Amino acid sequence: MKRPRIRLAAALALLTCGVFAWSGAGLAQQTTQDAEKEIEKYRAMINDPMANPGYLFVDRGEALWSLKRGAKNVSLETCDLGEGPGKLEGAFAKLPRYFKDSDRVMDLEQRLLWCMQKIQELDTADVVRRRFGGPNNTSDMQDLVAFIANKSNGMKYQPQTAHPKEAEMLAAGQALFYRRAGQMDFSCATCHAEDGKRIRLQGLPNFSAPGKDAKETMGGWPTYRVSQSQVRTMQHRLWDCYRQMRHPIPEYGSDGITALTVFMAKMAEGGEIQVPSIKR
Amino acid sequence: MKKLMIAAALAGLATTAVAQQRQKVDPAVLDKYFQSMFGKANDDWKARVTQDQTLKDCDAHGNAPPPKLFDEIVAREKATVKFPADGNVLGDWKKGLQVANRGTGGQFSDAPGTYQGGNCYACHEMAPTELSYGTLGPSLKGYGKARNFSKDEAKATFAKVYNAQSVMACSQMPRFGHTKFLTEEQIKDVVAFLFDPESPVNK
C-alpha cells in the first residue's frame, strides 16, 4: 500500500520536536503541561492509518498471519485467539484469557507462540530471539500483535476473570505489582500507585486502581515508540519496567508477565482500544 | 512531634493504599509466578530479588506496618547503618551533585562497571535551579539551610540515605548503603550536596 511519505516525515519531525521540548531541561510544570498539549495535537494529526508508522507493522503482521510456514507449511489463519478459529475482531479486547486446549491463561504473545508450535509446527526459537525488533531485525511478534490488536479498535477492554485460573492470575498479578525487591527495593507500585506523580518530568500513570490512567495506557498499547522506531508490545513494556526496577531479565512469554497484564487489563476495564497508538 | 508526623504520614499512605482491595495470595502461588519470570537468573541476580524480613513485613502490611512492627523494623535497619570511621559524614558537594543527577547502573542492560548513580532527582526537588525533578519524594530544596547546617542533622541524613528504613519503616526510598548501591564516599558526597552552604540546594 502506498503511503504519503512527505506527510509522514513532516508529522514525525513535529512530534520529535514536541518530545524534545517536553523532556528538555529547564522547564517549569506549566511548560510541561503546555508541551503535553502540543504533543496531543501532533498525535491527533498523525492518528490516521495513512500517517501513523505503526501501520507499517500492522501491514507486515497481516502478511505474516497468512504466511504458510513451519513443518506443516500452513498459515496461522486457523489459530483460535479465544473468539473462535481465525476470528480476530475483538479477540485482543478479551486477552489474556483461559484456553481450554492448553489449560492455561495466555496473553496474545503466548497464544501466538502456542499456535505457531501446534498448528504450524514452527521452531519458534528464531521468533523468540527476535521478540523485540531493533535497527537490524524486524519482530514477527511485534508485527502480529500490531495487526491483531488493531482488529479490536473502538472496542472496550473486557478482562476475563471468571475461570479459576484467570482469577488466580488476577490475584497473583496484583501481588506481583506490589512485590518489592532488587537493589532499590522497588515494586511497580513504587512509581504507579498514586495519581499525578512524576519521575523527573515524566508523568507516571496510576495502575493501582481502576480508572482513567489505566484505561488510557492499556487502551493505547501496543504503541509505536517514536524514540525506538518500533511498535512495542506489553511484554516489552514490562521487560523495560523490570530493567528500571533493577530486577533480572524477565522471561519472555512467562506467566508472571501475563499475570501482571491480567491485573492491568482489569484496572483498564471499559477502556477503549485505539492501537497502534504513538508515544514518545 | 516526630511520632505525630510519622503517624500522619502513615495515615496518608494508608488512605492511598486501600484504593483497590488487596487480595490474599498463597506465597507458594506467588513464588510460582515470580520464578516463571526470574527462575533462570544467576545466583547474584536471584539474591537481589530475594526479599529480606523487612521487605516481607512491608509487603504483608502494604508498607504501613502496625506501630510495634514499625519499631522492630526501624531497630533492625538502624543496626545496618555504618558511619564513616572518622565520623566525618560530609564529602564533596560537587561530586554529590553528580550522584544526585545520574541514574545509571544496576540495570540488566548495563555493562559491568557502569557508574551507579543515586538518581535523587528522579524523585526529589533539590537545587531550585534544576527544574527537571520528580515528585515521588518530598522536596529537599534548602535542606541544609533549613537545618542550620547542623552536624547532628547531617549525621542523621547520612543514616537516612544509607538506610531510609532506619528512620521510617517501609519507606519507599531505596536503602542505598545497606544494599551497597552507593558507596560510603558517594553517600558522604550527597550529604554534602544537601548540607554545604555553597551547594545550590541551599541557594
Image (tube, coloured by chain):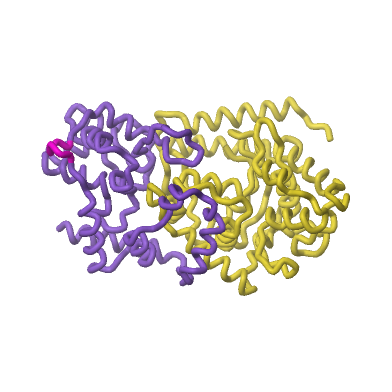
Chain colours: A yellow, B purple
Numbered label tally: 0
Image quadrant where residue B162 sits: top left
In the rendered view, does B118 fall on the left or right side of A213?
A: left
Q: Quadrant of the N terminus of chain A?
A: top right
Q: Position of residue A35 (x, y in %)?
A: 51, 35
Q: Is residue B88 magenta?
A: yes
Q: Is residue B60 above or below residue A233?
A: below
Q: Quadrant of the C terminus of chain A?
A: top right
The reply to whether residue A176 is visible in this rendering is: yes
In the rendered view, does B52 fall on the left or right side of B91?
A: right
Q: Position of residue B40 (x, y in %)?
A: 54, 52
In the rendered view, does B108 fall on the left or right side of A60?
A: left
Q: Residue at x 73, y 43 (%)?
A: A140
Q: Position of residue B126 (x, y in %)?
A: 29, 36
Magenta-drawn stretch, dominant element (helix, strand or loop): loop
The one of B4 and A260 positioned closer to us in this rendering: A260
Magenta range is: B84-89
Q: Residue at x 61, y 74 (%)?
A: A164
Q: Is residue B43 above or below residue B132?
A: below
Q: Is residue A215 above or below residue B67?
A: above
The one of B78 and A16 positioned closer to us in this rendering: B78
Image quadrant where residue B10 sits: bottom left
The one of A86 and A115 positioned closer to us in this rendering: A115
Q: Position of residue B105 (x, y in %)?
A: 42, 37
Q: Is residue A180 magenta?
A: no
The reply to whether residue A48 is visible in this rendering is: no
Q: Residue at x 78, y 56 (%)?
A: A88
